[in-house]
Image (tube, helix red, strand yellow):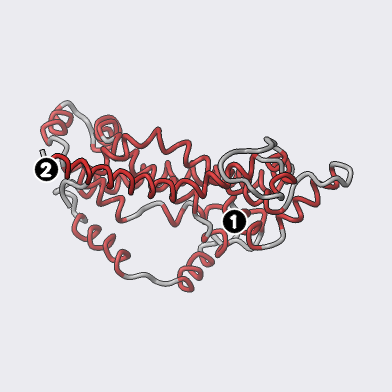
């Protein structure tokens, strides 16, 4: 009985600590959300902690009036969709080839893909290579350098090694080629681990600002994350607030701080919306991929 009370006390303390940890993680984003949805002039008075005091969409209206953000969103969507689809397909094909013992270059390609995990060329050599390939100020620089990732190949290879060999042998006996075996049998059976890799690379493409910062000198080719960085680091938010003021007949409708909060929400919400739909595949895929190295 005494032991049960001790366990209950441990569970209670553990639960409280987890709640406190969850609150510390979630509240900053919640605060950003309520400030972005509150009337900007009212938010200047302060005192916004738990809920919206005066509901308003003025911050979001002011941001979406700027063509710069809409253009950046189009580039970001192109990068996420094209980068994720091509990365998943090519990574799966690479991993599938490495599972075949009769593949001549299997050992060579395994060592070749492991080298970049330990040695990197550095920023300057990488920039020179991208420039020589004509990828500087080219939107394909967001996609082509990220078509393969060693960590994702290892996850997929571990999963594919667990598929029953008899299944592939039956397909080969029925006349299936390696290509049809990959598309018609291996890919449909690999949905959990493919969804895991898609989530990894999709979130990377959505959050990455370094590629645009390094390889794009033209702001028209920036992604939404680069525009967000510019708004936070410069007085761009003040400019948006000034434009909104002019549109409304010199009456202030938004503030620089409220514009920053709304921009943070706009660049964060898509990932939060997508994640719950992929979470079940994410957990299952990681467990299956971690059985063997």
Quarter of the image where one finds residue 227: bottom right
Quarter of the image where one finds residue 222: bottom right
**Observer-nearest of 163 and 73:** 73
**Observer-nearest of 15 and 183:** 15
> Eyeballing the image, is 197 above or below 187?
below
Residue depicted at x 32% and y 70%: 119
The earlier-in-sequence mark between 1 and 2 is 2
Q: Are marks 1 and 2 in contact (CB under 8 Å)?
A: no
> Eyeballing the image, is 248 above or below 120?
above
Residue depicted at x 44% and y 50%: 24
Residue depicted at x 42% and y 54%: 146
1 or 2: mark nearer the eye: 2
Q: Position of residue 77 (x, y in %)?
A: 55, 42
Please rate how many residues cluster around mark 2, counting C-alpha atoms within 10 Å: few if below 14, some from 14 to 19, many from 20: few
Q: Secondary structure at mark 1?
A: helix
Please rate how many residues cluster around mark 1, counting C-alpha atoms within 10 Å: few if below 14, some from 14 to 19, many from 20: many
The numbered mark at residue 77 is: none
Give the Cα distance between marks 1 and 2: 56 Å
**Observer-nearest of 269 and 72:** 269
Q: Secondary structure at mark 2?
A: helix
Q: Position of residue 91 (x, y in %)?
A: 33, 47
Quarter of the image where one finds residue 279: top left
Q: Position of residue 19 (x, y in %)?
A: 37, 44
Q: Position of residue 137 (x, y in %)?
A: 60, 59
The numbered mark at residue 226 is: 1
* Residue corresponding to mark 2: 3
Residue depicted at x 29% and y 36%: 192
Which residue is outermost to the front? 2
């Amino acid at each position: 009985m005494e032991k049960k009370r001790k366990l209950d006390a441990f569970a209670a303390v553990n639960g409280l600590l987890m709640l406190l940890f969850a609150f510390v993680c979630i509240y900053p984003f919640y605060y950003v959300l309520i400030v972005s949805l509150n009337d900007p002039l009212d938010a200047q008075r302060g005192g916004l902690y738990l809920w919206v005091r005066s509901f308003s969409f003025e911050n979001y209206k002011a941001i979406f009036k700027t063509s710069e953000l809409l253009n950046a969103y189009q580039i970001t969507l192109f990068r996420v969709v094209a980068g994720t689809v091509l990365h998943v397909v090519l990574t799966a094909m690479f991993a599938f080839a490495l599972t075949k013992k009769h593949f001549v270059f299997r050992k060579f390609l395994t060592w070749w893909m492991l080298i970049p995990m330990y040695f990197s060329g550095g920023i300057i050599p990488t920039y020179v290579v991208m420039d020589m390939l004509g990828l500087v100020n080219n939107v394909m620089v967001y996609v082509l350098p990220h078509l393969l990732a060693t960590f994702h190949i290892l996850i997929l290879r571990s999963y594919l090694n667990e598929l029953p060999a008899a299944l592939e042998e039956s397909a080969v006996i029925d006349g299936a080629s390696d290509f049809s075996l990959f598309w018609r049998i291996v890919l449909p059976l690999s949905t959990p681990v493919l969804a895991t890799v898609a989530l990894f690379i999709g979130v990377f493409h959505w959050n990455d600002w370094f590629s645009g910062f390094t390889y794009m000198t033209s702001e028209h080719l920036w992604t939404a994350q680069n525009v967000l960085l510019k708004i936070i680091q410069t007085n761009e938010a003040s400019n948006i607030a000034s434009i909104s003021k002019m549109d409304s007949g010199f009456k202030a409708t938004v503030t620089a701080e409220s514009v920053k909060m709304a921009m943070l929400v706009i660049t964060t919400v898509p990932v939060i919306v997508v994640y719950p739909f992929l979470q079940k595949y994410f957990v299952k895929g990681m467990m299956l991929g971690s059985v063997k190295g």
